[in-house]
Amino acid sequence: MNGRGHVAVGSEAEPVSIRLLGGFRVAMGARAIEKEAWRLRKAAALIKLLALAPGHRLHREQVMDLLWPDLVKKAASNNLRNSLHAARTILDPVARSRYVASEEDSLVLCPEGQLRVDVDAFEEATVGARRTRDPAAYRATLNPYAGELLPDDRYEVWAEGRREELRHTWISLHVELARVYEERGEYEKGIAVLQRAVLEEPTNEEMHAGLMRLYAFSNRRGEALAQHERLREALSGRLNAEVGVSTQRLREEIAAGRLLAAQPTVALTEEPSDTGKHNLPASRTSFMGREHEMMEIKRELAMTRLLTLTGAGGSGKTRLALEVARDLIGAYPDGVWLAELASLSNGEFVPQAFAEAVGVRGQPDRPLTDTLVDALRSKKVLLLLDNCEHLINAVAGLVALLLDSCPHLRILATSREALRAVGEVIWPVPLLSVPDLVSQPTEAQLEGYEAVRLFVDRARQHDPAFALTPENAQAVAQICSRLEGLPLAIELAAARIKLLPPQALLHRLSDRLKLLTGGPREFSERQRTLRSTIEWSYELLEEGEKVVFG
């Protein structure tokens, strides 16, 4: 330490702790930085942005777009230079670039590590709680949640998406914990969880319905019916809305005395708070792994308005995007809408596909794009564009128009190549983790690999008796490794399990294109064989590029 209490140049970096939930606070080791030190608001905003960003890294132009969207590039660049200098000086006036470093065209917060952000900890704990379904894990996740994200930045556009997303997660965790208590028969604990949460979210129908069930299971029918009345008044008074059909049906069951603790839980067949606000297809199969990827994509999407998931055919782009979108339904008040573009053969049909996705009808003698812009101009919407690769120019042009005209619109796209639109952030989708065959992992270790878990899950759909055993474990590991963690290839291979046990399947993989056929009906035609997936990619190449593969 030097005489002023700061770390001297060349010494070890101090651990940095940043709090964003309930307020903004930065601590360097045991030293808290006083609020008055952040006199330049944009210096604080820069640290907040980097703390929220995936990998705590942002491109300089992205920072300028977020903090100074109305300035020309030169003015924004000057402001960034001043804010960066101020932030570095506040964190460490001696080793100024240690804690906010420049790497090529990006800014990185704490590149030497030793950084703890409460939002990161909350999201990581959420993944763990959902995996274990342990009440203690849920409580440990919820207890440190100090309040909404950055309440002093309530009107900053760059914070809105993450704030809504985190609040939606906080609500969902309460509902999930109450469900866990309900399944365990610990009704009073579940009631206590939802009573606290409903004070914060008085119009959340799912919470009220959960309380109604728990009261009924506890032989407190009067309180269950009173809870329904409180919900009705809250929805009517605050939202001018009515109670959902499934919750009304639940009330009737309780009033008639037909909902008893000994009976199975009545499952809500609709999600009242999200009804009519998305057109995403229901999941027909379980979603395996990808928790880390989902978290990263949601973080990135909160920081940019156009995020494109790229990857080879069959790499799982569509399913990953759908699961992310499904997780964000509650964070977009005006809906999450899917436009499927794979079946379109001509870019002229792209505006119509967008319009159908968001429920917009064309008007006589008026361009459909103008109608789309007017419909979305003031709406907070997430638009999911699936399979853009064969219509790149048409999609990119319309995306640019919509983003320029609709400030609250965010777009998540999937494509085998980037859209190359202004402001686009590209997120390459990794393949599933596969075993390292050299280390000869045990059966238990194999279950930790995403590719193996996917194979086993899909194999069980075709043969419910299938299980990973000492006899077939190594063959399954080799299959997943040979298929390089490609989700589509693994699903197609697992579909053959009733005809071919893993050892025989492995032997036949020498002709993968012939073997890997017969995907489920819900797969598009181009996804039902590995060969057709490759042919689809080939047809997207320019004529000169095709010569290379001739």
Image (spheres, rainbow, N blue to C red):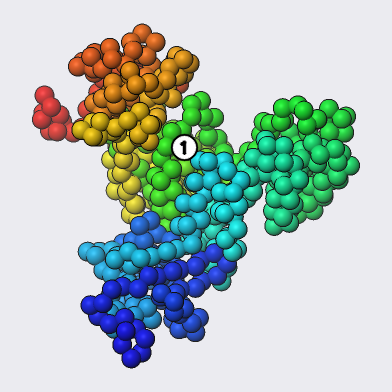
User: Residue 42: percent from the left, percent from the top?
Assistant: 43, 75
Q: In this view, does 410 lie above or below 365?
A: below
Quick check: 478 left or right of 14? Answer: left
Could you tell me which quadrant the C terminus lies in? top left
Q: Is residue 13 visible?
A: yes
**Toward which corner of the image does residue 389 lie, by quadrant?**
top left
Q: Can residue 390 be seen in this view?
A: no
User: Residue 460: percent from the left, percent from the top?
Assistant: 45, 19
Quick check: 82 left or right of 105? Answer: right
Q: Residue at x 64, y 40 (%)?
A: 180
Residue that sits furthest to the bottom in the current view: 3
Q: Which residue is drawn at 56% across and 53% down?
A: 141
Q: Residue at x 24, y 65 (%)?
A: 103
Q: Which of 82 and 443 is in front in this view?
A: 443
Q: Is mark 1 on a helix, strand or loop?
A: helix
Count up the numbered dots: 1
Could you tell me which quadrant the N terminus lies in? bottom left
Q: Residues within 10 Å of mark 1 (few under 14, many from 20)?
A: some
Which residue matches tag 1? 322
Q: Nearer the viewer, residue 507 or 230?
A: 507
User: Residue 255: percent from the left, percent from the top?
Assistant: 87, 33
Q: In this view, does 427 lie above or below 74?
A: above
**Toward which corner of the image does residue 215 lie, by quadrant?**
top right
Q: Which residue is drawn at 28% across and 23% down?
A: 474
Quick check: 290 left or right of 12? Answer: right
Q: Nearer the viewer, residue 236 or 503?
A: 503
**Toward which corner of the image does residue 213 lie, by quadrant?**
top right
User: Residue 547: percent from the left, percent from the top?
Assistant: 11, 28
- Could you tell me the amino acid type at mark 1? Leu
